[in-house]
Amino acid sequence: MSRRALLASLLVLAAASAAHAQTPAQMHEQAIVLDTHFDTPANFSASGWSIMDRHDFAVDGTQVDYPRMVEGGVDGGVFVVFTPQRGRDAVADMWSRDHALTRTAEILQMTARHHEHFALVTTPAEARAVLAAGKKFVFISLENGAPLAGDLSLMETFYKLGVRMMGPVHFANNDLADSSTDPKGPEFGGLSDKGRAFVRHANDLGIVIDPSHASDQALDQMLDLSRAPLVLSHSGVKAVYDHPRNIPDDLLRKLADKGGVIQVNAFSGYMVETPRIPERNAALAALAQKYGPQRDVKPEQRDAYLAERAAIEAQYPLPRANMDDLMKHILHVVETVGIDHVGLSGDFDGGGGIEGLEDVTAFPALTARLVAAGFTQDDLDKFWGGNVLRVMEQVQAAATR
């Protein structure tokens, strides 16, 4: 072949390659996009709030709804049954149980009411079928094991209701495990005996264990005890920012060796230094005294609460993490343990959100950043959903009941 003919052939091949090259938006659309920690069910009981309406984060502080999921190319997610820690006696155990059952029922009610757009799923195969039918899939997770503390047999009750992921502990130590953020420090040196039984029951049922809020010792013990991989549904890495909620590299490698996944958490306070401003803290404490915790604000008081909260934020602003900070966590995981063990959670409607990633509509912008960093379509398929769906399949395959 002459030099001229060779050059012509190369030009034809280059043109064909360019014609078939996909944009980041097209690559995002091709992936199954899911978030493993939507705290959105906390909004379901708010007066006048509907997941089918398009909301505005700047107006009502919410970050997930059906129109914004469509805009952000989000195919589904893990919707969370969050239960605050209110004590550890029999009365608190019953309150926690009833609260979690009510929140679970609200998720089931939402999927039933809007069955043309959402469907409850319990397996990756069901999620793919729902996606093929043009709907959004809904997995359910239990955040904080407080509802189970009085009776671990309730794990099977929640399993029958559709729950397929459970985290044993939240901000404070409970009867199952030490928290990474309890100011009193560790109580059990990791897991309690009941916490060890929790791990066994989760394995038997085929429930994904989520140690996101657990202490490092508790996470280490769960990795040793579990017969199946684990998912940190919303966490970060200590090597990038040293915070108790973030995982050190030795446990990151152990998580990956087990086949598990860390879903990097877009939560500013776990990504950048947050200075202590006494006046701000006092104002927020007074706001909580007036309305209660944000998750428990009465529907009819929500607008007033948000307006007063915004005024405090404006008067005493804090530095916020941005997409560069998020990318540092993601790329560190990839460099340390590989693309098979990383994903994302915005921790939306639960305090998450950073500059450039305020709600689910910003997910395509993150995909563009990932593509610019060298992610291929195969990488994106794993990152946005494939890794977590693979772990779910492994957990269910290892179940004995």
Image (cartoon, helix red, strand yellow):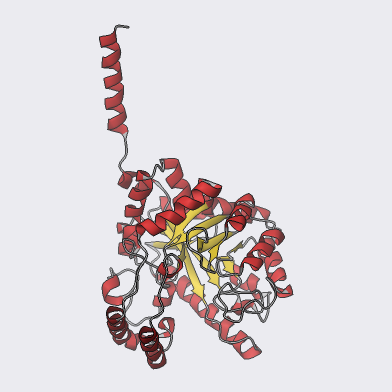
Instruction: In this rendered view, identify the residue nearer to me: 68 or 123.
Output: 68
Report the residue that reaches farthest toward the right. 193
Q: How many labels does the image show?
A: 0
**Residue 299 rendering spot, x and y as whole percentages:** 36, 85
Instruction: In this rendered view, identify the residue nearer to me: 233 or 55.
Output: 233
Residue 198 appears in the rendering: yes
Q: In this view, does 389 lie above or below 64?
A: above
Residue under the image location 42 percent in, 69 percent down: 273
Q: In this view, does 72 lie above or below 300?
A: above
**Residue 20 rendering spot, x and y as whole percentages:** 31, 33
Residue under the image location 43 percent in, 70 percent down: 269
Instruction: In this rendered view, identify the residue nearer to me: 244 or 262.
Output: 244
Residue under the image location 61 percent in, 69 percent down: 215
State the quadrant of the C terminus.
bottom right
Instruction: In this rendered view, identify the residue nearer to me: 273 or 136.
Output: 273
257 sits left or right of 136 in the view: right
Occupied quadrant, residue 12: top left
State the quadrant of the N terminus.
top left
**Residue 62 rendering spot, x and y as whole percentages:** 34, 72
Residue under the image location 55 percent in, 75 percent down: 181
Occupied quadrant, residue 248: bottom right
**Residue 88 rendering spot, x and y as whole percentages:** 63, 86
42 sits left or right of 88 in the view: left
Occupied quadrant, residue 159: bottom right
Report the residue that reaches farthest toward the top. 2
Residue 137 appears in the rendering: no
Q: In this view, does 394 lie above or below 61?
A: above
